[in-house]
């Protein structure tokens, strides 16, 4: 049964949002904001700042705030980019999981100019990951200068169609270039592929000229905006609707589709209703749920999704779901339900990197295999590359998912200034204990007899509570008068100490 797929694009001055719906359910969401301009696919003329053999990598200044990361396995052999930048040749032994051990002859020396392309967006404090193997993506083909092969997207599964497209690609492949046939090329003719190839070759000629003219570090090629890249990559014949709410963007995409895919024009439409487009398609509420830590499962149970520095951890909870059968069958039912929902959440939240899932314990190996198979089945719809390991006897599943950009959680949110991302804040007792130590250091360092302390009202109430008043005890112990001021604008774990003698704020002088 074919899914009804829709692409809904909401464009405003502050952001562009692209939603992919499958049978009315939000399956994928892309967000682009001016302050976080997309760099994926961009090509730069950079300068190798530092080669680090121990890391099998180099750091390349490409003109951004943080240097980009170039792993040796992403270094093309010399000549692969057309030899536009004269460079000394360095031989390196590269080890990576995909190709094993190999020797690369490549331009990598400190202060050397090099052409690189972004393959992963910057995440947190890490700069983007880049490759020196340049590629240009068109509607149906990917052009790779310096290569000799013609490949086919693995998502094209029909044997006869793969054979037809491979033959067409080999016949079309120009000397000195590699070609990859994209998934969207399925059912399209060799003539359509040829038109796309000519466009890419013309684009490459312009880039070659710009490579010589651009001073490093600098940008050579900027990939399509998020909206255009989604249309290019996801607008396949199975898309029922492509709806936009921006007249200017509508005209641009209409022009683009006329050139590259006229048959898709019948799916294109402009949203004219006064109701906001994401409200009309009931997407807005679903976006709110993306940042929720807990995801309730239909019929009982839940997922708890916690991102950490090293990985994303997912816990499967049974909640109040008991069922009428034995524990093993109930656990299996919840785990299968959780596996299906988790595959959807990974796509929707765009979670990448290492992911560890703690399923409810299952005693029978056969049942663990069923959950594993359900995960593999659910991940087939995912365009990102995934690698999944079998569930251990402890109910733990480990997997990786291709990470190209930060997860949506970090697009919509930023770390809390109080807890700094830990999700925990100091208790009242901890704050007051720290305050007591501050008073002790203040008295010893200044021998003042008076001090003014500004604190959060909750801290003030805790200090002045009836019975054992900590405030009176502090004044008696340190022989100092404390004037307490309440300020609701302060964070609960923060306070301000003012010295009457020196007539200034001395908080930092006696804090640790």
Image (tube, helix red, strand yellow):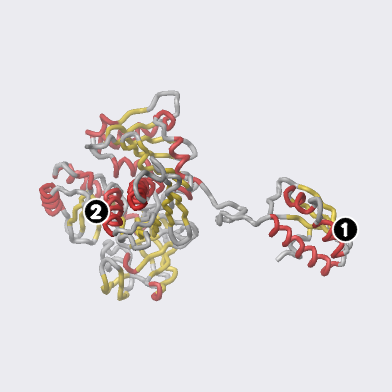
Q: Residue at x 43, y 38 (%)?
A: 286
Q: Is residue 340 left or right of residue 447?
A: left
SS of the residue under disc 2: strand
Mark 1 residue element: strand
Q: CA distance from mark 1 to mark 2?
A: 77 Å
Q: Is residue 71 above or below residue 414?
A: below
Q: Give the residue pinned by disc 1.
A: 481
Instruction: Locate residue 218: give its quadrant.
Output: bottom left
Image quadrant where one finds the C terminus? bottom right
Task: From the top left corner, tell me how far across and down residue 66 is, in percent.
Answer: 48, 60
In which quadrant of the rendered image does the N terminus lie?
top left
Look at discs 1 and 2 and give the one toward the viewer: 1
Decide: marks 1, 2 in contact (CB < 8 A)? no
**Observer-nearest residue: 114 or 377?**
377
Residue found 78% across the figure and 52% down from its top: 454
Decide which of 322, 206 is in the foreground and name it: 322
Q: Which residue is mark 2?
A: 143
């Amino acid at each position: 049964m074919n899914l009804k797929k829709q692409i809904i694009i909401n464009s405003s001055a502050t952001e562009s949002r692209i939603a992919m719906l499958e049978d009315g359910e939000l399956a994928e969401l892309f967000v682009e904001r001016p302050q976080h301009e997309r760099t994926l696919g961009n090509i730069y003329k950079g300068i190798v700042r530092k080669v680090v053999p121990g890391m099998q990598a180099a750091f390349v200044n490409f003109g951004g705030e943080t240097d980009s990361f170039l792993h040796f396995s992403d270094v093309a052999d010399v000549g692969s980019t057309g030899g536009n930048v004269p460079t000394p040749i360095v031989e390196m032994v590269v080890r990576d999981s995909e190709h094993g051990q190999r020797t690369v002859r490549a331009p990598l020396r400190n202060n050397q100019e090099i052409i690189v392309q972004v393959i992963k967006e910057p995440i947190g404090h890490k700069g983007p990951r880049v490759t020196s193997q340049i590629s240009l993506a068109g509607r149906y083909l990917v052009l790779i200068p310096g290569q000799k092969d013609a490949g086919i997207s693995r998502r094209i599964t029909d044997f006869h169609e793969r054979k037809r497209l491979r033959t067409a690609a080999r016949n079309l492949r120009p000397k000195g270039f590699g070609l990859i046939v994209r998934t969207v090329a399925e059912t399209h003719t060799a003539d359509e592929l040829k038109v796309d190839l000519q466009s890419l070759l013309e684009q490459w000629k312009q880039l070659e000229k710009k490579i010589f003219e651009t001073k490093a570090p600098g940008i050579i090629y900027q990939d399509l905006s998020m909206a255009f890249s989604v249309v290019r990559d996801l607008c396949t014949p199975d898309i029922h609707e492509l709806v936009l709410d921006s007249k200017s963007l509508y005209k641009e995409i209409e022009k683009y589709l006329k050139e590259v895919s006229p048959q898709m024009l019948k799916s294109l439409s402009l949203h004219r209703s006064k109701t906001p487009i994401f409200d009309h398609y009931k997407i807005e509420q679903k976006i709110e749920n993306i940042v929720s830590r807990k995801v309730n499962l239909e019929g009982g149970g839940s997922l708890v999704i916690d991102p950490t520095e090293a990985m994303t951890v997912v816990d499967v909870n049974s909640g109040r779901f008991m069922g009428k059968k034995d524990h093993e069958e109930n656990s299996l039912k919840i785990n299968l339900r959780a596996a299906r929902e988790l595959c959807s959440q990974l796509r929707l939240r765009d979670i990448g990197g290492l992911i560890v899932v703690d399923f409810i314990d299952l005693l029978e190996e056969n049942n663990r295999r069923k959950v594993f198979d359900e995960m593999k089945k659910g991940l087939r719809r995912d365009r990102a590359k995934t690698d999944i390991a079998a569930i251990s006897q402890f109910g733990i599943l480990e997997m990786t998912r291709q990470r190209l950009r930060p997860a949506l959680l970090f697009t919509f949110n930023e770390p809390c200034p109080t807890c700094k991302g830990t999700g925990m804040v100091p208790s009242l007792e901890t704050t007051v204990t720290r305050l007591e130590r501050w008073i002790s250091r203040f008295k010893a360092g200044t021998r003042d007899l008076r001090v003014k302390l500004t604190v959060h009202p909750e801290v003030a109430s805790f200090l002045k509570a009836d019975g054992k008043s900590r405030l009176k005890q502090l004044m008696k112990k340190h022989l100092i008068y404390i004037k307490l001021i309440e300020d609701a604008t302060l964070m609960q774990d923060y306070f301000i100490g003012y010295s009457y003698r020196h007539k200034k704020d001395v908080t930092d002088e006696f804090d640790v």
